[in-house]
Every structure is written in structure tokens, then in C-alpha cells.
Image (tube, grey):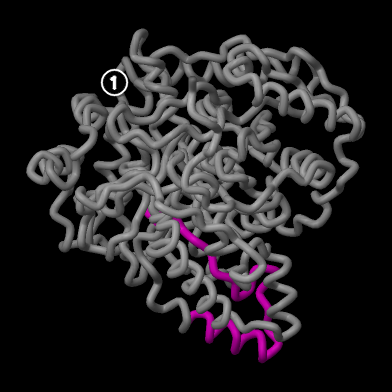
Amino acid sequence: MSDGENHQGRAGDVTRRKFLAAVGVAAAVAPGTGFRHEAVSVTCPQTHRSTRKDRHELEELGFGDLADGLRGGRWTSEDLVRLSFERIDQLDHRGPSLRHILDRNSKASELASALDAERRSGRVRGPLHGIPILLKDNIDTADDMTTTAGSLALEGSHAAQDAGLLVRLREAGLIPLAKASMSEWANFRSTRSSSGWCSRGGQGRNPYVLDRTPCGSSSGTGGGVAASYTAGGVGTETDGSVTCPSATMGLVGIKPTVGLVSRSGIIPISATQDTAGPMCRNVQDAALLLAAMAGPDPRDPATLASVGRFPSDVVPLLDPGVLRGKRIGVTRRGFTGYHPDVDSLFEQALDAIRQLGGEVVDPADLKHAEGGDAAYQVLLYEFKAGVNAYLATLGDGVTVRTLTDVIAFNDREQSRVMPFFGQEILLEADRKGPLTSREYRKALKRCRQAFRSDGIDATMDRHRLDALVAPTGNPAWPIDLVNGDHSTGSVTTPAAVAGYPHITVPMGQVQGLPVGLSLFGSAWSDAALVSMAYAYEQATKHRRPPEFLATLDIGVPV
């Protein structure tokens, strides 16, 4: 459901290139046309700056701003849909050509009109009533939008029913505006994949610097929210697919505890790691969106334990003084030291936490920061089982029914589907046996022990911590369709493999490229982490809007 890029693989395989921390998709061609390779370009001939003269009406506005405008009559929900599509027209196909949208909801204006009528009648469903959002292209929508995981193999696939989380979002009054692009099969296709590329849409761009990666398989959602297509969106994560693009594009991203948000109706990677999560431009908005998504769903048994775990009213969480007296553990070993400028910003972040009254416990390293090959093996087994189960439910218009069918389709359509990298991971997964296999059960047990009982839980208990903290990852690297992604550091894996919550919040910029601060902790500590992230955000205010630079002007090496 999310990404395959921080997966740790065999020795000598560059830890599977930190495989599970990047995931995304890009789309600028009309749905159903596929991606023409001669159109590939990862640079932009001009710089598109947001000046007062050309500033869009919705730029940088959050859920609260939009709700106030709807309440005061500045806009109707139909206006918001129109303005959001206008913004997409301005940036996704023209101007910087961000390539973050695959499908638009043709019924969005109709849905908005109905919600406007409800508002006029005095019925307001909540703080998100009548507001458009983006959904990642692996989330089922029972409408005219397709759900394809960015793959031409699923082109034209229409879901029979909404994903469990979308049922809740519709009840909250949110409008699914468009399907955001994503790394094909959530970056779980090749060890040389490029985050943000898919065969349906091509290569997505980072709105801060257009020739840099948007990172992670939820790159389309992240890029669209960063560029103010909407105030928020929903991504999914297996390891880094919400948090990496959020950090790389100046957003707040929350990977909840597995089970807080339903996974039903989402194209999966891992039954033990997958989760959907909000991606917004501030903590308050991310908390509101998470509250709307969270809760039990009979279609996903893991959610039955979620009752009461996250409040429906997030206002009590938004306390700027909440860090006072909190013990925050610094996970240095393995998660710092890969970039001096990131380390410098991290030290400033720790100082800010101290100034806010937090007690910084330094170091509070994880005993088992690396999972070896076990985490990757778990994903291979679970991906095959999950994808086969999902494909078996699709309607008659889809020709692929198994992972084997997908592989065969890709071979037949190699020129369109695999012009830059192959499908080694799909092949490896397809060779795996059932989830009753001894190898799978042994690997899963090792992961649970290494990242839960001997990892996060042990470290937090030993130091009596309220949260762990580290830089989310390195600044965005240049897009490279020849070699693929080349991340140098990330902290996404421990919480991902454990199934525990993780939130990233802007920590500053390196040469104009955003980087994030990660807070993570034990199971079901989502609400506490949101509160601490909010306090840090309000004290530091590090988010800066993107300027759509063509490239970084940092001089020529001599």
C-alpha cells in the first residue's frame, strides 16, 4: 500500500537502497493514454515564482481558513472545487508541470453542490464539511476515477465500493477531488526505481526544485498538497511513503499506528506495515484529517482495537506548552551523521525542544536499528498474498488477476512500462510461498522482536521516554532515471516495521530544500505525538511555500 524503498535487503545490495522510504506517482497525461517516453523531462526551462501578482486565491490556505471562508460566505464548496481544479490546471500540466494528478473526479462539483445545500439548510457535518482533498491512486473510490497504483496493468480499473477510510471521509463532508500519482506499485517493483515515476503518468517533480525527487510513493499527494492543489490529502505508507515526501516537500505527514485507519480497499504491500495517513501543510490540519479517517471498519479486523485511540475533537491536542516536562529521546546511532547541514538543523531542533521545557535524553539509541533481510522478506511474502487477494476482487474490465499476470503484462508492454527500470521485486515476490511458510513466520517474528520489544519499546522503557526524535531524512536528491533513487539517510524504518506511529514536521531547509523532524513512539501514542509536533511547529514555524525553481543555483564545482 505504500512504499518499497527503505526495505532492507541482502548485504551488498545497498540495504535495498533504503528501499522503503520513497514512494510516489506522477501524472500529466490524460488518463488512459499511458506515458510517452519521448516526453520525459526532469528539468524545467523557466523558474515559476509565486509573486503577489500571480498568487492563487487558495495558495497556502489550510482547512481552518477554508472553513472560515465557507462559513462567512467568501466561497461555496463549488467555488473551492473550481479553484482547486484551476490551480491544478495552472501547475500540473502547464507552468512547472508537476505531474501529480492522474484522474479528476467528474462528480466533484455535484458533490460540492449537495454539501452547499446541506450548509444552507443548517446541517454542517464538522470542521471539514465541503472541503476538497487528494487521494493516492491506490485508494479505491466508487466513482469514475480509477484505482491503478500508477500501473498501466490496472488502467481502467474502477472500484465497486469506496475504501474504508473514504467512507469515513465522505461522512465528514470531504470531497474526493482527484487521484494523485504515486510511484508505480508503491515503489515495490524494482531496486532501481525512481520515486514519483509511474507508467501511467511519468515522473513527478518536487515543487521546491523541479529536478529533485518528490520522494516516496505518496509523492503525488505530497507534491499536490505542497503546491496548494488542496489543503490536504491522503497517502499510504509501508516504510517512508507518507513521511519521506512530507519531509522532502515541507509538509506534516502522519503514519499512524497500524490499525488506527482502515486499509480495506487499498492496493496493498504489507498486512503488517501498511497504513494510510494524512499529508497537510500544518499539524492542526493533519490532526483533523486523521480524526476524520480513524476508527473501526469490519472489513479490516486490525482496526477493531482503534476505538478511543484518537479523539474526534482534536482541539485539546493543540497545546503549545505540551512539551514541558516531556522526555524526548534522541536516536542518533544510524539516523544522524549522513549530512552535516541536516545535523545542524537537528541540533537547533533539540535546542527548541529544550527551550519549550522538554527534557532531551541524548542519546537514546535503538538497540536494533537494522532489521537485516527479515523485513524485506516479510514484505515479499505479504505483497504477493495481498496483491493476489486484491486483484481477485476486481471487475470484468481488468485483465490481470494475479501477480503473475501483472508480470506478464509488464513483459508484453515493456516499452511503455519498463523504459527505465525493471520488475525484479515483483519477480522475487512471485516466487514466494504462502503466509504459512516457515521462512515468512520466522522473519516476521524476528521483525516484531527487533523493532518492537527489543527496539522502540525497550528504548522508551529504559529511558522513561514520551517520544523518540531524529531527522526524517536527507534533502531531496536529483531525479535520476538511469540509476534510480539514492537516499543517504532516513529514520522511517523502525516505526514502519514495528507498526508504530510516526509524525514528521518541517525542521528547516538545506539550500532551499525542506527537511523534516520525526517524532515516533510506542503503539497508539498517535495523539501524544501530534501534540508534541504541534508545540514544536508553533514555536519554530519552519514551513516555507515552494518557489518552483528549475534547479539549484549553487555554483559549478571547480
Q: Is residue 344 above or below residue 128?
A: above
Q: Residue at x 22, y 63 (%)?
A: 32
Extreme-left residue of the structure = 412
Q: Residue 354's quadrant in the figure?
A: top right
Provide the residue span drawn in magenta. Answer: 111-139
Of the pair 33 and 314, the residue shown nearer to us: 33
Please tell me whether residue 268 belongs to the stretch shown in magenta.
no
Question: What element does badge 1 sit on?
Answer: loop
Q: Nearer the viewer, residue 25 or 543?
A: 543
Is 275 placed above or below 160 here?
above
Q: Residue at x 44, y 51 (%)?
A: 220
* Residue 116 lies in the magenta stretch: yes
Residue drawn at (69%, 32%), measured in percent from left and top? 519
- 364 displayed left or right of 264: right
Vertical position of residue 71 compared to residue 19: above or below = below
Quadrant into which the N terminus falls? top left
Number of marks in the image? 1
Q: Residue at x 53, y 31 (%)?
A: 555
Residue nearest the viewer, comparing 471 with 57: 57
Residue closest to the far front:
558
Q: Amino acid at mark 1?
A: Ser
Q: Is residue 60 visible?
A: yes
User: Which residue in the structure is indicated by mark 1?
Assistant: 437
**For residue 171, which quarter of the picture?**
bottom right
Closest to the observer: 264 or 521? Answer: 521
* Residue 544 position in % (x across, y down): 67, 49
| Residue 38 placement (x, y as % from top left) | 20, 50
Up the image or down, 155 lies above or below 70; here it is: above
- Could you say where residue 387 lies in the image, as x and y percent from the top left? 28, 42
Q: List x then y, in percent, for residue 465.
A: 78, 23
